[in-house]
Image (spheres, rainbow, N blue to C red):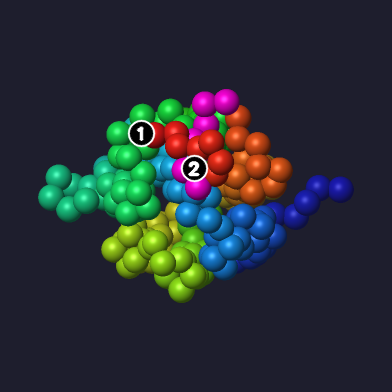
Amino acid sequence: MTAPILTPDELEAALRAIGAERYHIHHPFHHLLHEGRLGKGQVQAWALNRYYYQASIPAKDASLLARLPTPELRREWRRRLEDHDGDGTHPGGVERWLALTDGLGLDRDYVVSQRGLLPATRFAVDAYVRFVRERTLLEAIASSLTEMFSPAIISQRVSGMLRNYDFVSEATLAYFKPRLTQAPQDVDFALGYVKTHATTVETQQAVLDALRFKCDLLWAQLDALHFAYVAPGLPPPGAFIPEDVAGGGAR
């Protein structure tokens, strides 16, 4: 039996239900992180690997921007590039993430070199960039809708890390504060676009699948961190080894 076409509000509810089930706020590694149950080296490993995701977002957004058909749409999406790359005067999200890795004691050249990445991090992030570049414009925009759920995870992360780790400060975590206003603004546009243009069973299923894909790759990144640095604690050859692990010191 063919699934019914959802109303725009029903489609939004279905998208939000995906986040309620699959968003990485539920991942065990995230719970360990914001509850203060990780060592400094494990937090460093998280920040180091997450940098590759943050640094790849502008490339993802630039490929999508090039496909938008009108000046109005391009202006809207161009704001995301400035949010992450900065405007030459104010630092963007990528620079603020490097301030986080600096604050955690990681060598910036090492972070930027990407030498210590987990292979699964690289595979997952590259898959996201490729998805946005190759799939339909509607699917590409829908994949950004994990931002619907990011204010909740940011609030947990910042409050928990400030409360539980003496090696972080508000300055260290300065990346997150602008995202509390930037992400809802991004969602207003992307969700409106999806609700307007996903008007058939096929296109609605495509945007739901795109959001599932995005949730899955965020989850996969934390799976890899948990396997490498928590249990069983088996980082692959070439990956970052924290200095607080026996034999460590990968800088």
Residue where numbered disc 1 is placed: 110
Mark 1 lies on a secondary structure that is helix
Furthest-top residue in view?
237
Residue depicted at x 66% and y 57%: 28
Residue depicted at x 65% and y 61%: 26
Give the mark nearest the N terminus, 1 or 2. 1
Q: Compute the Cα span from label 1 to label 2.
A: 13 Å
The image shows residue 20 at horizontal and vertical percentages of 65, 63
> Range of the magenta residues?
237-244
Residue 153 falls left or right of residue 79: right
Front of the two marks 1 and 2: 2
Q: Which circle marks residue 242 in the picture?
A: 2
Callout 1: 10 Å neighbours few (<14), some, many (20+)? some
Residue 132 falls left or right of residue 229: left
- Which of 59 and 251 lies nearest the eye of the viewer? 251
The amino acid pointed to by label 2 is: Pro
Quadrant position of the C terminus in the picture:
top left
In the image, residue 148 sits, relative to residue 163, either above or below, namely above
In the image, residue 28 sits, relative to residue 95, either above or below, namely below
- Which of 87 and 139 lies nearest the eye of the viewer? 87
In the image, residue 120 sits, relative to residue 219, either above or below, namely above
Note whether residue 54 is visible: yes
The image shows residue 199 at horizontal and vertical percentages of 60, 50
Furthest-left residue in view?
89
Note whether residue 80 is visible: no
